[in-house]
């Protein structure tokens, strides 16, 4: 199965790579196809959804994942808006993962786990927006985005805990699970 994706940042890309590594147990032929890298502006995604879908369709993607941040907006509103901009001919292939605030909120949903993995105090991550703490704990810099380390972290992450603690992650994962069930490549059920 070829999974096309478009993300806002390097942590988002590493997140998907970590999920792919985890899911290889269930879908050994899964391949990630990177679509256009959007950057962090909402305007970019709004303008580019149709072009990215076309680009990934040409690459024979059987699923297209868009990851984006809701920032200060309600993630459900952002999801509704962005999925509404998806061309009708691609809706059945497209999943929008809208992080409640940002991807670091998903990664840090289980504060005890991330604290143990980064040798930090759990209280360090008990913030509305743990992005700065996460980047510091991982040693992320503008030169070294630590994508391999983040992918490894995600591969072994407690997804069932994230599913219980973060509604936007739960929504994203459920959509992927349902897609996998319909397409004979069932991924891990974390409910």
Image (cartoon, rainbow, N blue to C red):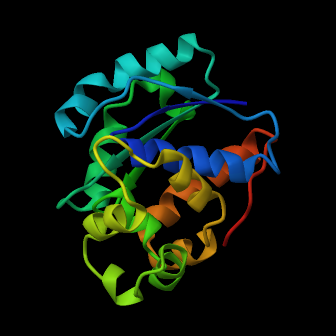
Q: 148 or 18, which lies in front?
A: 148
Q: Is residue 124 above or below residue 56?
A: below
Number of marks in picture: 0
Comparing 138 with 33, the one in front is 138
Q: Can residue 96 be seen from the camera position used here? A: no
Farthest residue to the top: give it: 58
In the picture provided, is 30 more to the left or to the right than 117?
right
At x 41%, y 87%, the residue is: 122
Query: Which residue is located at x 54 percent, y 54 percent?
Result: 149
Which quadrant of the view contains residue 135? Answer: bottom left
The spot of residue 186 in percent (x, y) is 78, 50
Specify the quadrant of the image occupied by residue 52: top left
Whether residue 139 is visible to the viewer of this picture, yes or no, is yes
Image quadrant for the N terminus? Answer: top right
Q: Is residue 181 above or below residue 3?
A: below
- Depth order, front residue of 104/84: 104
Q: Specify whether 162 is left or right of 52.
A: right
Residue found 66% across the figure and 64% down from its top? 156
Quadrant holding the C terminus: bottom right
Residue drawn at the location 57% of the way across and 78% of the way down: 161
Q: Position of residue 118 (x, y in %)?
A: 48, 73
Nearer-the-camera pick, 111 or 117: 117
């Amino acid at each position: 199965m070829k999974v096309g994706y478009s993300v806002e940042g390097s942590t988002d890309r590493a997140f998907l790579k970590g999920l792919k590594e985890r899911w290889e147990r269930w879908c050994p032929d899964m391949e990630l196809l990177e679509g256009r890298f959007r950057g962090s502006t909402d305007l970019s995604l709004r303008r580019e959804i149709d072009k990215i879908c076309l680009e990934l369709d040409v690459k024979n993607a059987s699923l297209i994942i868009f990851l984006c941040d809701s920032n200060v907006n309600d993630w459900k509103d952002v999801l509704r808006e962005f999925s509404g901009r998806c061309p009708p001919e691609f809706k059945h292939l497209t999943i929008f993962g809208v992080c409640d605030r940002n991807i670091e909120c998903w990664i840090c949903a289980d504060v005890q786990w991330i604290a143990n993995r980064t040798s930090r105090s759990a209280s360090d991550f008990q913030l509305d927006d743990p992005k700065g703490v996460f980047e510091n704990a991982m040693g992320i810099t503008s030169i070294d985005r630590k994508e391999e380390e983040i992918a490894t972290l995600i591969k072994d992450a407690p997804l069932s805990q994230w599913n219980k603690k973060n509604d936007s992650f739960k929504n994203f994962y459920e959509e992927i699970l349902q897609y996998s069930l319909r397409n004979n490549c069932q991924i891990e059920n974390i409910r």
